Image: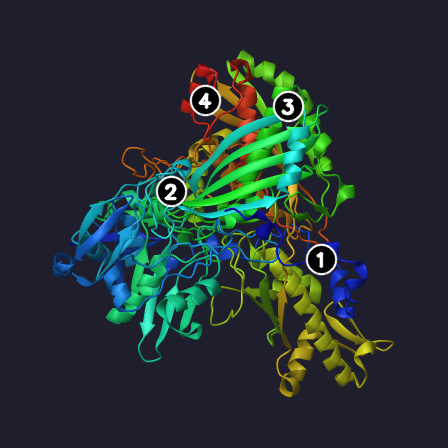
Amino acid sequence: MNSPLKTAAPEEIIHPLKRLKSDSPELSPEMKLVQEALFKHVGKPIPRKEDGRLITGKGRFSDDFSLPGQTYAAIVRSPYPHARINGIDKTQALASEGVLLVLTGEDILADDIKPVPHNPVPSTNFDMKLRARDGSHAFTGPHYLLPSDKARHVGEAVAIVVAETAAQAADGAEKVMVDWEELPWVTDTAKAAEPGAPTIWDEVPDNVFIDTTFGDVEGTNKAFEAADHVVKGEFHIHRVTGVTMEPRSSLGSYDPETKRYTLYAGSGGAVRQKNELSKVLGIEPKDLRVLSFDVGGNFGTRNRVYVEFGLVLWASRKIGRPVKFTATRSESFLTDYQGRDLVVKAELALSKDGKFLALRSDNLSNVGGRAVSLSPLSKGSGLITGSYDIPFATLRARAVFSNTMCTQAYRSSGRPEVTYVIERMCELAADQLGFDKLELRRLNLVPPSSMPYTNAVGSVYDSGEYEKNMDRALELSDWATFDARRKEAATRGKLLGRGFANYVESSIGTPKERAEIEIKDDGNIEVIIGTQPSGQGHETSFAQVVADMIQVPVEKVWIVLGDTDIVSVGGGSHSGRSMRHAGTVMAMASADLLAEGRKRAAEIFGSTPDRIDFEGGVFKLRNSNQTIDIFELGRRTRAGHGPLRVVKDNEMHTPVFPNGAAVCEVEIDRDTGHVQIVRYTTIDDVGRCINPLIVHGQTHGGIAQGVGQAMWELCAIDPVSGQPLAGSLMDYGMPRSDTMPSFQCEIAEVFSPTNPLGIKAGGEGGTTPALATVVNAVVDALSEFGVKDIQMPVTPANVWRAMNSGRKAS
Amino acid sequence: MSRVTITVNGTPQTRDVEDRTLLVQFIREHLGLTGTHVGCDTTQCGACTIHLDGKAVKSCTVLAVAADGSDVTTIEGLADGSILHPMQQAFHEHHGLQCGYCTPGMIMASVDMVRRHDGVLDERTVRHELEGNICRCTGYHNIVKAVLDAAEKHRAAHAVAAE
């Protein structure tokens, strides 16, 4: 039985924004200083410090590393979506030229190599609590580096072959003979949850391992009964994949003398990799060093452990030589953690004057062969009501296993999906009930006066001016003069359509972060932090923050990341957490550093810390001409007090809610159904913006990924064979320079009250509304054909079919 | 095995290579010049773009033996000592890169484009001609800006030179 009450009433946690103000502690003088910092660098579009090496070919990506005596690994993968492994014969492979080692799932068990402890259920105080149907903690499917029982998706690794060269390893992999027994399979999300579907895990015969209901069921039912109108919609936000331009790569090395392992592998956070892989290998975390320097794109796909990372470490110990594995692009398409794949049935209740009264949503997430992360389902669950004040809502959130690659958080995890649903529902409601699309939205937007606003499933929106965003986006996009453009396009045989969407999203992320700041003798400041950029420019924007706090030029601040021998604690980079978490802890560390500096300066001046001022990087004894520069202070006090250095830990659970709006114009060719985006406009409230150059860049890339999903991208699977059909860049539609427009983007800054710098997040806002915005525009363009909805991606085939059937294309 | 000699960034390099060795493997693995990247195996992404006898080509689709006797420039050879090539400078100033993985290929392709058009470029042409280089981070917006800016500076420099 479903037990909504059990899950809807978790342990009592009072949201910080709902507490009485007197609860907040007094700010220290240093923290006040930090808050009132001059912001010389913060807010400025400073070009990035990391560019120098990347534009001259001196980046340090994972495959760029090689070690003496290095060997190469190739992986044997399942050709079937679901098949039992009755045995694996290594004989021929081991006899193949250059082959040194072959390992299988049987060897995993023999060596007691543990499953990857993915911990897929989000667990911060303000995450939605997902549970099994009976309210218990869910079975999520163990993830061994190599399975010994069966393969659960095409591409699942079942053996590793190590050889002297990469080519010999690939040759050897072809000679590993697996005795396969094909099993019934299911890949489709809705079908996997239907009665009688093939079972992926015996522990969960019906494949549905999460089934939780949130919200006020009774209140929602009453609101629906009293409603004048009910609008219904069904949506599939389909499966896509991250396509990081750098294929994943790992180089493992074991030193028998120190008994330590070293792994070079780009990821979303080296500390997580260290902690989880050390559990896999059954060693202490200190015995594994993980290095992750330049990372060629992440978008969520690299946040979790990949089996090959563990395999190269284990194999390296077995043969006593370093082992390297670099995925081909086809392997990336098959086995990079994928994204989205949510099926939603929604119902919206409205009064006769258009007020939203209640929402029901049934969300089914396809996690693939095992659960690696439930972040997408969880994130979306808290945001089903979108930017709108809907008094009652219930959500049934389910997750289902299937014979597909595992899904994971992907660019704006979970939020584009639910934004798509609520924004499509707005359009359907307006169309069916005769309201103006924009006025219906305005009528129902959460007003600034309601902030902090608790939505019907319990999420507390921290701040935002939603209608102002809407007005600004419409103005920037020249919404008012659309008709003239449409007439002009018609003269060229094109159908012009326009789409609009609001969005609000949540940024939570791993709550802990540590900053270490040291004043170096050479006149530089070193900052050690546990986030992991993959293009977000942390080396610049973080330096801007510290430079402002310690009041030195930004050139003097150096950010150290990505080596677990130096970075001990760190939550990595995901969910738009980095600037907020790192910025806050760096500000707190800076405050501590200044307090320590004040103490040391007082000692030198023979005074007390309260008589020391700090300005422009210089400590000064008040009402005197005695001053000392912070670097000089560090040098002079090193002998007596040690380095001028602080370590600060911080934990923040309170989510923030970036928000905004987007407008898209598309031109559709009447004859071919080809869609071209001709205008794209966004407004994003990111809270305080540290570096607008970088934030705009994040928005641009985010738009492209959202637009890509709406327009071309699809992890297609052949319904007859269960085989993935997108195995290379020739059969997966990517945004390219000639299919994307230039964008018009503006940043709005409504400071968040949840953290001292007022930061929200800037990494995902481009993506969140893009799916809805593009589809709204396409449906608008096709209105004369009676098209009311269309399945993404809006390929020419789908559009042509919609134009010629007047119904929802499939 | 075959012996090949390829001049890379001005220095002749002779190596014995397996016949199936790709030019990109020669550059990355035999010479250790890891600035040239591999992003796919189907000549789609352009991360491996270099200049072969002055023209931009995808080095994953040329055999090292086929490049014997040729002149190759990689991203490492583009700057003049510590002075960045104007295209590198433009990518930096316009934030035309994020993760930096596609960047070497983007820059090499763009340098060749400006050369071929003698700096006479518009947005449409730049977008059309960069279609064979995939970027996942930037949405191309700032890359296009960077290339147009570098093209403009190329034109200006040549106009001055012509006076």
Amino acid type for the residue under numbered disc 4:
Val
Q: Nearer the viewer, mark 2 or mark 3?
A: 3
Q: Nearer the viewer, residue A190 or A36?
A: A190
Q: CA distance from mark 3 to mark 1?
A: 37 Å
Tag 4–tag 1 contact (CB < 8 Å): no
> Callout 3: few (<14), some (14-19), or many (20+) C-alpha neighbours within 10 Å?
some
> Callout 4: few (<14), some (14-19), or many (20+) C-alpha neighbours within 10 Å?
many
Circle 2 marks a residue in which chain?
Answer: B
Q: Is residue A65 visible?
A: yes
Q: What residue is disc 1 on? A: A16
> Callout 2: few (<14), some (14-19), or many (20+) C-alpha neighbours within 10 Å?
many
Q: What residue is disc 3 on? A: A430
SS at mark 2? Answer: loop
Q: Nearer the viewer, residue A702 or A778?
A: A778
User: Reading the chain from its start, which is encountered first: label 4 or label 3?
Assistant: 3
* Same chain? Circles 3 and 1: yes
Q: CA distance from mark 2 to mark 4?
A: 30 Å
What's the colour scheme? Answer: rainbow
Q: Is residue A469 above or below residue A413?
A: above
Q: Nearer the viewer, mark 1 or mark 2?
A: 1
Tag 2–tag 4 contact (CB < 8 Å): no
Percent coordinates x, y for residue A584 in the rendering? 66, 61
Amino acid type for the residue under numbered disc 1:
Pro
Q: What residue is disc 2 on? A: B46
Q: Nearer the viewer, mark 4 or mark 3?
A: 3
Q: Nearer the viewer, residue A319 or A546?
A: A319
Percent coordinates x, y for residue B9 in the rendering? 36, 53
Q: CA distance from mark 4 to mark 1?
A: 48 Å
Tag 1–tag 2 contact (CB < 8 Å): no
Tag 4–tag 3 contact (CB < 8 Å): no
* Same chain? Circles 1 and 2: no
